[in-house]
Amino acid sequence: MTVIAFIVGVLLLVVGLAVSIGLHEIGHLVPAKRFGVRVGRYMIGFGPTLWSRRIGETEYGVKALPLGGYISMAGMYPPSPAEEPGRAPGRFFSAMVQDARTANDETLGGSADGTFYALPVYKRIIIMLGGPFMNFVLAIVLFAIVFSGIGLQTATTTIASVNECVLPAGSTQTTCTSSDPASPAAAAGLLPGDEIVSVDGTAVSTFAEASAIIQASPGRALPIVVERDGQRQSLQVTPMLAERQVQGEGGAVTTAEVGFVGMTATVEYVRQPIWDGPQAALAQTGQVFGIIWQLPVRVWDTAVDLVTGQSRDPNSPLSVVGAGRLAGEVAATDAPILNRVASLLTILGALNIALFVFNLIPLLPLDGGHVVVALWDALKRAWAKLFRRPSPRPVDATRLVPVTFVVVIALAVMGGVLILADIVNPVQLLG
């Protein structure tokens, strides 16, 4: 692999990730401003500020590490309650709760106007789901570009090459000898450039359809119609029985004895229907939802592989470092540029699906945690209304700061394990 191409691939992923994060935060920012919430800051990244500019009440900026982002809304939580005698939590967590309340009180401005906590529940949910929704939409767009804009590599019915002879499966031999039998395709008179129209009387539209008929018919003469130089010609080919690698229904590749004629197909990009990209994004989203609850176990398995030196499971989770490394390897492969572009867009689309699903986890400080707080607030209000009780004060989510702290530490530990594993024991997807 070339170093320059590898670096370009990594940089492209970093830029794509920064754009994804920026759009995520815009998904929060736009409805927040639409609903009248005061937004103090809109930042992409963490760490030292590289650039910022204030427009109206909001400071927009970019920070050094594009590993996240945030917007700062006024009154994410209600004002601090009066001191509650008799409550004596541990000093450490008590100080954390108080610090969170103090920081929140500074954004209130002495009024509930323009604050997040004072919004109706449905508006708070719209704001918090706006970020993940933007990632999901971006993933759909990226997959649509790959499937319908670029297309999928598909073996067409046009013959690319015809083998002169039949070589044993797994042989390192590259040239034919007099003892090697002629291939059935060559014996039948098939030529590169021929377009297969039908096999054994069955019209075929893909090379896979033609191959299925051939593999199922060893030793039987098959009429085959091809179009050559604008004219249709009828030939006859007799597949021989040979050991070849075949792909099963589950995608597993095995060796089996099948009919074989010795020809390969021309591979072209075939644009898929516009709905295929969104369908692929939805399918991958379902898969991510299915494994997200297994994340701690998968990270543990990755840590075990790291310590024992075993090869990592190709399906193990990746950190940003691992995704960047994979993007670099894709960019540096000896493949057509369109192949590499499609692969990079697919990686970025998968990252956005991961961001979408991950942010829906119902734990603070993730977006899903804020949605749960809003729903709990709605439930309390509905309960009070049902029994004609006074409306309760808004839910004070600062009480959950200790839980938030534990979640952040857990995420940091898992992220650290994955980063270390991606450096020392990376996933081998490209050989």
Image: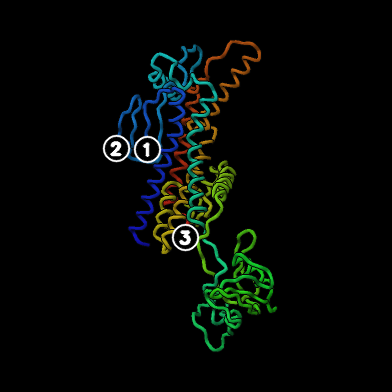
Label 3 element class? loop
| Pair 3/2: label in front | 2
Dot 2 and dot 1 residues touching (CB under 8 Å): yes
Residue tagged 2: 50
Q: Residue furthest front?
A: 230
Label 2: which secondary element: strand
Q: Is residue 117 left or right of residue 227?
A: left
Q: Residues within 10 Å of mark 2 (few under 14, many from 20)?
A: few
Disc 3 packing (10 Å; few <14; some 14–19; many ≥20): few
Residue 195 visible in the picture: yes
**Above or below, comparing residue 339 to residue 360 in the picture:** below
The CA distance from mark 3 to mark 2 is: 35 Å
State the separation of the CA atoms marked 1 and 3.
30 Å
Q: Residue at x 47, y 50 (%)?
A: 347
Give residue 95's mark. none
Residue drawn at x 62%, y 70% as measured from the top left = 197
Inspect the image, locate mark 3, and give the three-letter code of the amino acid beneath it: Leu
Q: Secondary structure at mark 1?
A: strand
* Figure colour scheme: rainbow
**Residue 149 point in image, percent of width and height:** 48, 53
256 in relation to 395, above or below? below
Report the amino acid beneath label 2: Leu
The answer to which of 192 and 121 lies nearer the viewer is 192
Q: Which mark is residue 430?
A: 3
Q: State the residue lying farthest toward the bottom.
A: 178
- Residue at (68%, 77%) from the top-left corner? 222
Along the polypeptide, which appears first: circle 1 or circle 3?
1
Gap in angstroms between the C-alphas marked 2 and 1: 10 Å
**Label whose residue precedes the other's in the sequence (3 or 2):** 2
* Residue under numbered circle 1: 45
Q: Amino acid at mark 1?
A: Gly
